[in-house]
Amino acid sequence: MHSSEHEAANTRAWTVYGQHHLRRGTEVADVDRLTWGFWPSGPGAEVLGDLSGRRVLDLGSGLGKFAAYLVREHNAMVDAVESSPTQHERAVARYGSLPGLNLIHADAVEHLKQAEPYDVIYSVHGVAYIDPHRLLPALCNALKPGGRLAFSVLHTNSDGRGPSPSVAPRREVLPLAGGDPLTVQIWTLSPTLWEDLLVDNGLLVDRIYVLDAPDEGNRVSVRLFRAHRRACVSSRRE
């Protein structure tokens, strides 16, 4: 399967996910911090630096709860891009009238190619659903010189399976409350692979945070990367 087919399968899975929660009328509370893992621990918005008046992009924004939090509490101007139409629909219903938040339904890479450069780009688990060879050049080109990138990705899943040794997606399960689990394809890579890819695409890693599940027996582990743009390797409009 070509990487574009993996990405299309992921969009379909998240569309089913969003439709399921639209039907259920699932209520999700507003957040009071930026959470990078699957639990309310670890660093928060401080990873992104001072956001007041900054132009920020949330990549793979889902319901938009983190983007809304950064607008409300950190005075950021946030574009939130989501490829799933149903997840975008949920976000619009919830936060569509919030000043300073721009909810966008689009393919992330296509948006990055057309958007004016951002001061900060971040993603909570969204990066791993997109082929890094397609995504990272566009990410670098969509950042202002010296602009900051932060993203979290799965490192070890609930079965204890660690990252892949090559730049290829693998099957993971997306839990669906009240429904059958969905299958997604995720680029679950080692920190060394991620850093090599980032450097190859003009992004220098400042720090990698290890975010382990806080409860004993839970083997899920996440890595949070903080990087910044140096020189890019391709044209923004390619």
Image: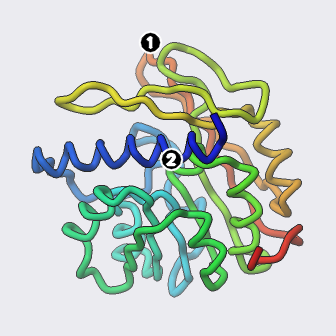
> Which type of secondary structure does the marked residue at label 1 adopt?
loop
Q: Nearer the viewer, residue 108 or 29?
A: 108
> Which type of secondary structure does the marked residue at label 2 adopt?
helix
Q: Nearer the viewer, residue 191 or 51?
A: 191
Residue 60 appears at what percent x and percent y? 48, 57
Residue at x-position 69% and y-position 74%: 142
Residue at x-position 41% and y-position 21%: 215
Q: Is residue 2 above or below residue 130?
A: above
Residue 116 is tagged as none
Label 2 neighbour load within 10 Å: few <14, some 14-19, many 20+: some
Q: Quadrant of the C terminus?
A: bottom right
Residue at the disc numbered 1: 217
Left or right of 147 on screen, residue 12: left
Q: Nearer the viewer, residue 12 or 102?
A: 12
Label 1 neighbour load within 10 Å: few <14, some 14-19, many 20+: few
Residue at x-position 55% and y-position 63%: 108
- Identify the amino acid type marked 1: Gly
Q: Is residue 165 above or below residue 191?
A: above
Residue 8 is tagged as 2
Q: Quadrant of the N terminus?
A: top right
| Model colouring | rainbow
- Identify the amino acid type marked 2: Ala
Q: Is residue 161 above or below residue 87?
A: above
**Disc 1 to disc 2, C-alpha distance:** 34 Å
Residue 126 appears at what percent x and percent y? 52, 50
Residue 23 appears at what percent x and percent y? 12, 47
Q: Earlier in the sequence, mark 1 or mark 2?
A: 2
Examine the image and state in which quarter residue 40 appears: top left
Left or right of 223 on screen, residue 235: right
